[in-house]
Amino acid sequence: MKRIGIRDVAERAGVSISTVSNALNRPHLVSDRLVVRVRSAADQLGYVPLQAAQQLRAGRSGLLGMTVINIANPFFADMVAGAEDAASAAGLRILVGNSSDDIAKERDHLELFERVQVEGALVSPFGPLEPWLQRLRGRGIPVVLVDAVDDTGELPSVSFDDVAGGRLAAEHLLASGRRRLAFVGAREEVRQVRERLHGAELAVAAHPGATLERIWTHRTTSELGLAFGAQLAARSPADRPDGVVASNDHLAIGLVHGLISRGVRVPDDVAVVGYDDIEFAAIAGVPLTSVRQPAREMGRTAAEMLLARIAGTAGSGLGNVVYQPELVVRASTGG
C-alpha cells in the first residue's frame, strides 16, 4: 500500500508543497482559507506527518539508543524495560539493538544510532567498542554504559559487582559442604562472565581441599545447559562436581533438567546456583537458587543518568553506580 505523502496532499488541495508544509506546520504564514483547504485534503487522504522527520528538523530525534547482549535473556529484557520507564517519563522512545552475542551486530547498532541521530546511547557491551563509542561522543551523543564499567574512566556507568556475585554463589555451595565445584559459563572474554569466575575462584581458594572445574559453552541457552547437565550426569559420582555455579539462569535451569533427566538428584547429588534471578528461576521444576541482579532498576538508573547528561544537569562527576549482589536461596541448593 502506497504511503500518502505531502505531494499527494498538495495535488488534492491544488496548492504547492510549500503551502501544504506551511498550512500544517506554520499556519500563521498562510490564510485561514488555505489552512482549512489543506487540512481537509489531508484528512480525506489519511495523511500522517512523518514524526521522525519533523523531530530531526527541530534538531532532535526523540530517540535514545540501547544495545543489549542478548534480548532473549530476561535479564536484558528487564533492563530495557527499566530504561523505557525513564525514557517514557521524559517523552522519549528507545531504539533497541540486540547484539545476540555478536560483536559485528553490536557495532552495526552503534552505527545506526549515529545515522538516526539518537539523543543519547545506553550500551551494554559484548566486545571492545572504543572507536564506535568515541564516534558517537564526537557527534555530541552522550553515552552511558550499562552492566559494564569503562576501564578508561571516561564514561559514566551502571554496573554490578560480579566478582562479589561469583564469590557469593561459590561460598554458598562451600558452606553446604560441597567441595568439587564447577563453573559453567559462556565466553571467557566477556567481562561479566570472567569476573563471576574470578569471584568463584577466590571463594574456592579460601577452602583447602576444594576444587573448581571450568566448563565453557559457546552460548548461554537452556538447551546448552540441558546438554551439559546430561554430560555431567554421565560421569561417575566421584568424577562429577557436587556443586555448580552457572553464569546465568538459562544455563542453570537447563543444567538442572539435564541432570534430573539422567537420574542425578538436585540438590542431593549436585547443587546448582544460577545468576540473574530471572522470573522463571522461582517457578522452575526445581526452584533455582540464584544471584539476584536488579535488572529493571539498573536500566532505569542508567537512563536517568543519560537523560541528565542530555539535559546538561548531570554535574561534574561521572556518576558510576555499582549494585551489590543478593543470593536468593531455593530448592536447587536445598533451601
Image: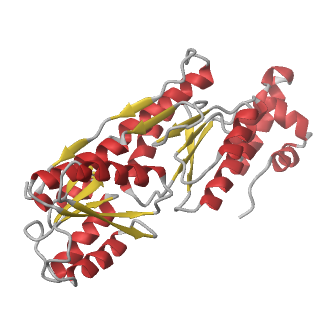
Between residue 42 and residue 151, name the one nearer to us: 151
Residue 86 in the image: x percent, y percent?
A: 46, 32
Q: Position of residue 298 (x, y in %)?
A: 40, 37
Asked if one can make out residue 85 in the rendered structure from this viewpoint, the answer is: no
Any part of residue 239 in sight: yes
Q: Residue at x 35, y 75 (%)?
A: 223
Q: Nearer the viewer, residue 17 or 138?
A: 138
State which quarter of the image contains the C terminus. Answer: bottom left
Corner quadrant of residue 295: top left
Residue displayed at 16% across by 55% down: 173
Left or right placement of residue 44 versus residue 207 in this view: right
Q: Nearer the viewer, residue 33 or 134?
A: 134
Q: Residue furthest right?
A: 16
In terms of image quadrants, where is residue 62? top right
Quadrant placement of the N terminus: bottom right
Q: Relative to 114, does residue 222 appear above or below in the rendering? A: below
The spot of residue 325 in percent (x, y) is: 28, 40
On the image, the x and y values in percent for residue 326 come to: 23, 41
In this view, 267 is above or below 20: below
Question: Dividing the picture into quarters, in which one does residue 114 lie?
Answer: top right
Display coloring? secondary structure
